[in-house]
Image (cartoon, rainbow, N blue to C red):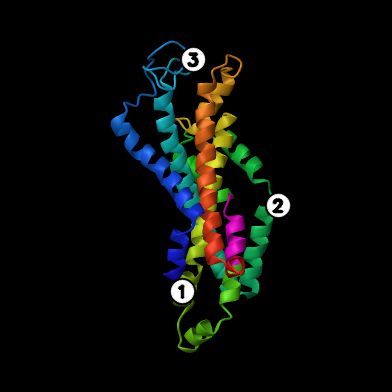
Amino acid sequence: MKLLLNLLKTPMFVIGTTIFFGTVLVALFAPMMYHVDIIARVGMPYMPPGKEHLLGTNHLGVDMMSLLIKGLGSSLYVGFLAGMIATVTGTLLGIYGGFKGGWQDDFITLITNLFLVIPTFVVLILISSSLKEGRSLALIAGIIGATAWTWSARAVRAQSASIKSRDHIALARVNGEGTLKIVVKQILPYLFSYVFMVFIMQTASGILSEACISMIGLGPYDTVSLGTILNEAMRNEALGDGAWWAFIPPMILITIIVFALNFINTSMEGVFNPRLRK
């Protein structure tokens, strides 16, 4: 509780959470206050921002504010889902390997190291390009999560291996508690803050990964994300036409979200890591 109170007093944490949850609230409630239509043509191509269209229009004459609201929600969805998949997978494998030791740990470490040396972004490109149809947001998030769990597993494994040598773990073994019970009751509570920090960074990584693959034309087919907005602006020469409103706002949103998540993670590490506290 004391650490939590210290965290709430950290300016960086307050700033990061305020900014991040502000973007989440915009994604959730902006469609209720602003008529979002990502299909209808409401004006001429690349109309500049004005009273009628606050952020102008894109190359098709679609309202940019509508696209940004929709894209923000899609990018956050991919980030959350990819972060959850990567964190859960990495945490389960890391805890199991670190706690069990022996050949199980060696095998999981071998698999983890094999995945670590493979360029993740190249794998994302290859898998996404092979999916000719049905590239949905959920599928993109699943692909990102399935290729990003490795460093989570490695980091959690190191923490789990250090915790298993503590006295309360030995006492639990003497009392006849099974592996699952020890992991849930004796190890996970000590790793909760660490796993949460891993989830934050995996979420930020998921948002960036989706933006990158969407920007090169391998994003979702069925909806709009911040990455697909950048892809449309790049393909239709928004920069050459001077239509800064077609690519600057999504870039700013991505930057704000990732910086806010990094602020949260850095402030949490500063509070929960004993070495940094000293």
169 is within the stretch colored magenta: no
Residue underneath mark 2: 117
Q: Which amino acid does label 2 sit on?
A: Val
Query: In this view, which residue lies farthest toward the top?
Result: 44
- The label on residue 46 is 3
Q: Distance between the residues labelled 1 and 2?
A: 31 Å
Q: Nearer the viewer, mark 1 or mark 3?
A: 3
Q: Is mark 1 on a helix, strand or loop?
A: helix
Query: Which region of the structure is painted magenta?
Result: 148-157
Residue 250: image location, x then y, percent: 50, 31
Q: Which of marks 1 and 2 is nearer the N terminus?
A: 2
Q: In which quarter of the image is the N terminus?
A: bottom left
Task: Report if residue 14 is visible in the image.
Answer: yes
154 is within the stretch colored magenta: yes
Q: What residue type is labelled 1?
A: Leu
- Choose between 15 and 229: the one closer to the eye: 15
Query: In this view, which residue lies farthest toward the left?
Result: 32
Residue underneath mark 1: 180
Q: How far apart are marks 1 and 3 (CA)?
A: 58 Å
Residue 264: image location, x then y, percent: 50, 53
Q: Residue at x 58, y 36 (%)?
A: 212
Placement of 25 over or under 268, stated as above or below? above
Residue 149: image location, x then y, percent: 57, 54
Task: Report if residue 132 is visible in the image.
Answer: no
